[in-house]
Amino acid sequence: MNRATIEARLLDWMREEPERSDERRFSELALALFAWQFAHCEPYARFCAGRGATPERVAHWEEIPAVPTGAFKETPLRSFRADRTVKTFRTSGTSDTARRGELHLDTLALYESALVPSFERALLPGFGPERRIPMFVLAPSAADAPDSSLSHMFAVLLARRGAPESGWFVRDGGLDVTALDTACAAAAEPPLLCGTAFGFVHWVEALRRKGRRLTLSPGTRLMETGGFKGRARERSRETLYEEIAATLGVPAERIVNQYGMTELGSQFYDSVLASPGEPRRKRIPPWVRVRLLDPVTNDPVPDTEAGMIQILDLANTGSIASVLTADLGRRRGDGFEVLGRDPEAEARGCSIALDEMLGGGR
Amino acid sequence: MVDADVGRALRARSRASRVEALGRALERLADPGGETYARLCEEIPAATGFHPATVRAGLDLALAQFHRRGLEALVASELGPNEVWNPANAPRTTAVVTGGAIPMPTFEALLAPLVVGSTVRVRPGSRERIGAGIFARAVAAEDAELGAAIECVAFARDDANAARAFFDADAVIASGSDATIARIRGQVPPTARFVAYGHRLSIAVVDGRAEAGLAAAVAEDVVLWDELGCLSPVALLALDDVDGWAEAVALALERRSRALPRGAVPLAAAAAIRHERDTAELRAAADGRTRVFASADATVVREADARWGPTPLHRFLRVHPVDGLDGLAAALAPVRAWLSTVGAPEPLHPALSGFGFRRVRPGQMQAPPLDWNHDGIGTLRPLLPHRGG
């Protein structure tokens, strides 16, 4: 199966309503994609061969070697000719010494097709396909941040589902709080606020400094993403949600966290709006598999235990589909929860990890 | 709360008397045949997850520096003769928050206030939580009056009232991450002296052809305390023969780990090690120069350049090539502000003298003398900032 065929079948799958998990289809496409990437990405082929994993020997998708997210900072991981690159997304860099991870794409079609259904199912359940909503984005625009996958994602979603009053509220590196307050007050219907967690921290703190509290419409939805690593004002997600509820009037059950990363074509959203009343968990798109692994044995951990998050994302056709993150997670029903990177950091030795000092490191 | 009479009695004693008693307490602590030493060997593994054999080896090396002469040398180097030191500047009460995983910094943090005549209350860290109690008992066994001046307390992190009472002291000594230090700083009264030991890192430097004895010494510095101390090397910079050094140190680490196995590795640390190992393997597949030497208890990555990478600790060592001393200087530039100690063979020490960090022989990095200039701050001096005033 060549890549064009794989992508055509994936595009069909992404457009299916209702979404449908299909183990046989996943397995077939995953093995075909592995064979393609093995043949077209030389460093990955050598990496896999070093582990005895070749297309001839790999019989099940779980045997496909995963590349660590750190590898995307080391070498271009593309399964196409470099001169066909149409877009490169880069991870955020927090210091001069930090290398940035890169996702190279030779087509945006699959990338954009993958992001829409997951977003719509998580944030706009019950909305008709043509209905638009005011979307206020607490992130730089795609024009201001052309290598940000997050800004690109928001641009696609704004174009597809945003009402005319939608817009970007991070300008010149800062959050335009006044414009955001005004837009919320003027919105014709409850808006969807989306952006980085740190953008919301800025907004909440700006309102607090002014002694203000907003009471946004009861139907307001909020989607936040990203962490606080390396930020001066770190806080837990629970604390942030409490602050948002107290300052913006949006309760936690209407706040959806997105777990995504530059290295992946697909994203994972909290289930709170799609499955109200059920435990919060990250939903997994049908064309993705998430495994939670023991970092020493590489075996899956029991469902009640935490493990390293490994993701096999078929939307990553042009790079590498199987990715090992540095995050820990735990299975939650048909989804999972993300526990973060280092919950035991405080108990570690007094020698600080270099990446913390250097703001992201290698 | 330490009784006020105890504090008065402590201050009324001469410094020499306090130092003499504390010196005896240190020697009790460091006596390999003694009961206190046995308790350390027994209780530290259970409290910290370090392997008992590794704890024993670490204590054997480090506590050999804990003796009365060492304490006198510390006092002499930091405070000078009595007549130029004004005891009126000493804090009467000192609060100590310990961090990290190994006990020696705890001992030093408790020692300092007692030397200058201050009572101490200590809140042990979450991982190294037994050193303070054992130290207090060792002091009390030698000198009941000094022993009564140490109080170990425990309270929940979110207990604001307890924290307020704890930090209501003339001086506060704290060690930990930048975030921990910042959090503590916010709780310290503005009138108190705040002595903070933030996170630091150490490295090793070698030159010439790889040599098994020196490689074993570097491995020893990594193995002790599972690389979790701020004096543990997180990287080896090789001026020559980087392949040879990486291979030799990897072999030495594997061998030494048979006798001194690595202790418990938290899940997050195990995940970080796995991630960095796999990343290095991918890099090796791409550049052909990176090499990964992985054994059950240790990882050595022969890097292709001097660019720093994440340090998962728990016996994970990167070996970088550097091009001469200029290359070394360039490599160290990004981390210079955090550098504590460099392990390097003695013939290299003069060439490294201009760099400003502490230089010791490989194999001795985990055995600083009591009078080492801790983080460039010192141990006693920061409690008496107005020396002679």
Image: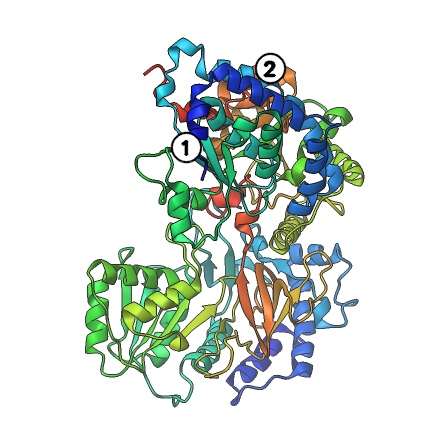
Instruction: Residue at 60% x, 54% y: name it.
Output: B268
The disc at residue A51 is: none
What subunit carries mark 1? B
**What residue type is disc 1 on?**
Ala
The answer to whether residue B305 is visible is no
The disc at residue B4 is: 1
Residue B179 at what x, y percent from top left? 43, 46
Between A9 and B58, the residue placed more toward the observer is: B58
The disc at residue B69 is: 2
Q: Is residue B378 above or below residue A104?
A: above
Q: Secondary structure at mark 1?
A: helix
Q: Secondary structure at mark 2?
A: helix
Q: Is residue B155 above or below residue B379?
A: below
Task: State the CA–CA distance, disc 1 to disc 2.
Answer: 30 Å
Q: Is residue B234 above or below residue A317?
A: above
Residue B347 at what x, y percent from top left? 64, 15
